[in-house]
Amino acid sequence: MTDSLTLDDYARLLGGRQALQDLLGVGPSALSNYVKRGTIPVKKRALLDKAVSQNSHKQPPLSQNHISEAPICLLIITGGIAAYKALDLARRMQDAGYQVRGVMTKSAEEFITPLSLSALTGEAVYTELFSLTDEQEMGHIRLAREADLVLVAPATGNFIAKLALGLADDLASTLCLASTAPLYLVPAMNPVMWAHEATQANCATLRARGAVQIGPVSGDTACGEIGSGRMSDVVDIVAAVKAHHHGSEQASLNRKALAGLSVLLTAGPTEEPIDGVRFISNRSSGKQGYAIAEACQKLGAEVTLISGPTALPCPKGVARIDVQTARQMHEATLAQLPTDIAICTAAVADWHVRGAGHKKVKKEANAAPPQLDLVENPDILKAICAAAHRPPLVIGFAAETDNPLDAARAKRRRKGCDWLLVNHITEAAPVFGADDNQLTLMTDHDEISWPRSSKQQLADRLASEIAAYFETESLPS
Ligand code: CTP
């Protein structure tokens, strides 16, 4: 019923952007990723749908809570004569594609009124830290968290000093302390104040913490003195913010290209008991699967690793579920669906021993060796592909010795996975236990041979291919 709901709709129904983040347990960057991709990961959509159906009796919140594709610029205006230029800045930031939310200090109100700023931005302008009305409409923490960037223009010497010290004695300074968004400072003050060692040291401190300083420039200042301290031209401020913010957004998007997506991964061998002390297994070390889990996690994915027995430590940030047999792996894996991506790297034993017990089987004098009655194990990859909640991208692996590409093409069809990564095993280049590998990626359209490299490099490459796939493909709802 909610198949056609967009993030905008969910935000309207569930109480805004922060409410969605809280509900999904993701940060603003993951939410921005969904907006940019125009897709919602299946697990997250299920959570949203559940919340919508639970909330359906409630009044929809105000439309001002909606998710706009426009990044939110928290424009903080402090009290200097250049404050009047901030009105033009607000307008031009909007023209540049930003949603501007105005915040003014008490001294800024000596120069311009919140009403004029509000008329320009079409939004409430926030001035008080302890305003019941403001806190009810938009708590100050939410105001800080929702910001994609914080722009302080003009930034007085006093305000810069407060930020350098980490003071939070009014709304504007509290927001700067409570926000993790990029901070842009546009100093404007008397040239002597600007040149003062204290101001220079404060700005250096803030730059060292990552703040971007724009200006000041030289010229006439309001107090009649000539020198450096004049606020940069509004057009230059907008250009500087846009160039820097776009660059850092791209970088963080690339760093977290899988943010908000869930990856289910099988890895390692399985062990099939013969009796209480013996088992059938294989030579898989789990290295390739663990490397992929780590690579996907580094790109921001939520990774669940269903692992057979290995000696490897669990990669940081990855949730690992340990299993021993193929049947346990099968059950644990299917229980994790739905996810956005499934990757089966496990070397699952093809058979288990019927009736294997916990007791050790003893040799009987003059008796024939016991016969193992082997039963085929469930095919986990095939089961994922056939599942009602089939992940939008299912990836299998194949290790082949004879006619590897022909065998792999047939295997991809048989299993029904989207991508298959083929290992070509030769005597000279064993795969099991080695630190490097050579893979061919087979998809519906391509067969690309990746050069022999370390398992970690191959894992990074696969994670980037997955990210590129989700950049261009639309997830089915
Ligand atoms: N696989 C699985 N469950 C199984 C067997 C295999 O999930 N019971 C998955 C593996 O994790 C891998 C792919 O299927 O992603 C291919 O595994 P492979 O051992 O090459 O294929 P098999 O189906 O076992 O076929 P064969 O051994 O006959 O080549």
Image: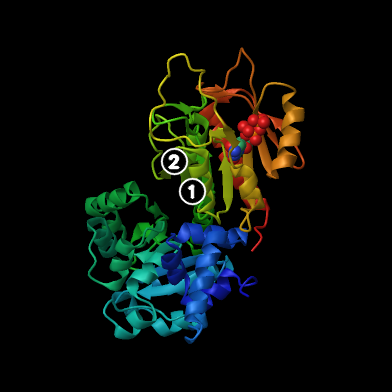
Is disc 1 surrounded by few (<14), some (14 to 19) or many (20+) residues within 10 Å?
A: some
Q: Secondary structure at mark 2?
A: loop
User: In the rendered image of this protein, does residue 7 appear above or below residue 359?
Assistant: below
Image coordinates of residue 476 in percent, x first then y, are 66, 60
* Residue linked to disc 1: 332
Q: Residue at x 58, y 18 (%)?
A: 430
Q: Quadrant of the C terminus?
A: bottom right
Image coordinates of residue 294 in percent, x first then y, are 46, 39
User: In the rendered image of this protein, does residue 358 appear above or below residue 423?
Assistant: below
The answer to which image quadrant residue 423 occupies is top right
Query: Position of 310 compared to 193: left or right?
Result: right
Q: Nearer the viewer, residue 269 or 164?
A: 269
Q: Residue at x 59, y 43 (%)?
A: 380
* Residue linked to disc 2: 323
Amino acid type at circle 1 is Ala
- Disc 1 under 8 Å from ligand 1? The reply is no
Q: Quadrant of the N terminus?
A: bottom right
Amino acid type at circle 2 is Val
Most extreme residue toward the front, as rendered? Answer: 366
